[in-house]
Image: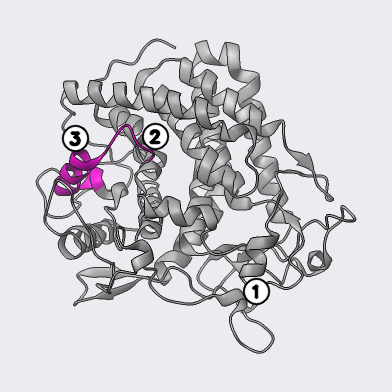
Amino acid sequence: MSHRLRGGATCGWLAAIGMGLFLAWILLCGVSIAQGQTKAETTAGAVQAGPSMDPALASDWMRRWKQNILDDSRKSRYCDKEMGEELGWLVSPFVNGFYYGYMATGDREWVVRLMDWGDSVIKRGVKEPDGYIGWPKNFADEQRQAGVEGADSITDSELGEAMFLRPLVLMAGEILKTPALKKEYGVKAEEYIGLSEKTFEKWDSRGAWRETKEGGLWVDPPFGIDPKTGKWTSGYAERSKGGVSHPANKENLLALWLIAMYDVTNKPIYRERAEKWWRAMKSRMSLRENGKYFVWHYWDVGGPWDFQPNGSLKYGQWVGVHPNGGYYGIDLEGIVAAYEHGLVFTQEDIARLIATNRDFMWNRQVKNAKFQRIDGGEPNPRWANSPGVLWDALAPYDPTLRKIFEANLDPGDWSGLGSTPAWVARFGPKSKAAP
């Protein structure tokens, strides 16, 4: 059995310190700015030039960001040791930072650093029983805590791999369309895209994708590798029926990887899969207060595979609003990416989401802004500082949310690793170095 705790052990603390780093994943997809409006009055795919950052602020941000990412990447070197889901929560923030560092500066230093980290992870991949490459990790202790029986398997993580591969794919796309980079790094770029495509093929062949009435979603498969035999555990035989649905934040992160794959390869399958999840996502969102605001659950039942034989939900799953608001910030990354691609979510949806975060959740303080839960519920002591968060993905669409973002971002901390260069690439001085 391969099921991991919902959100992952690392995801819990990462979400608790803020989701700003995930903004980096979508800012350059073609966002628009609603200047002075009370709602987003843009159409999907349209790109409008928003007001530029103050050059001095952009310079200060990038100086502090560069010192932080270089210092932290030298100290941590997560790329040399992490496996499984931690490829996402611990490795991808740096790889995203390197990618957006290039997008902000045009300096190929960041291409080289991305490849350093990317290749360090890739060379540690192992061939698994079905012949695909993975980065398996022993989740036995975590599984036992969740009440999973027979929790002695080793398993890789579709989420961790998707989060890690996404910036590699995006960088590969930049390399292949930039002659000077393609000449030197084109072969490596093709290798990254090929690995990402094989990874999609791997999880698809393992029965991790499920079609649903509303669209489709990914599940955490019901099997792993038996450490004693090196073969699949018994759940492999039921791979098309077993498993458990991922929570919305993980589904959205997987969709972000797929839409990046579509953007770079133009292969419809990736767009179609992302769109099916976003259709399922939207079907789970409810309106409240006469249609002014949105609310949705952290996790919902995806299909019969989510139930035990006695009718109870598997592994302590529950349906409801999560008291850690960081997970909802990730959901908005996916929703905005869908909108930017003209998929599922509409201008009206974006306006309501802005209203939810700005008019309902926000405490009206720009500096040191605080946000309440999406449903207005009481904070949980475990996540006392993040019952709700700024939905960074919406900041480019609303002047108030943008002010909050720029007033509170710290380029020198963890949340600034990716979001700082992504924001400067979008709104900073247009003076990229020659590649």
Position of the C terminus, as image quadrant, is top left
Asked which secondary structure carries label 2, the reply is helix
Of pointers 2 and 3, the one earlier in the residue sequence: 3
What segment is highlighted magenta in the picture?
Answer: 395-414
Residue 147: which disc? 1
Q: Quick check: is 400 in the magenta stretch?
A: yes
| Type of secondary structure dominating the magenta stretch | helix
Q: Which mark is residue 417?
A: 2
- Residue 149: x and y in percent read 73, 73
Quadrant of the image occupied by residue 354: bottom left
Q: Which one is in front in this view, the residue at disc 2 or the one at disc 3?
A: 2
Q: How many marks?
A: 3
Q: State left or right for residue 41 relative to residue 258.
A: left
The span from disc 2 to disc 1 (Cα, nearest Å) is 35 Å
- Residue 143 in which image quadrant: bottom right
Residue hosting label 3: 50
| Residue shown at 51% from the left, 25% from the top | 74
Q: Amino acid at mark 3?
A: Gly
Q: Would you call the spot at circle 3 few (<14 residues within 10 Å), some (14-19), or many (20 or more)?
A: some
Q: Residue at x 22, y 36 (%)?
A: 48
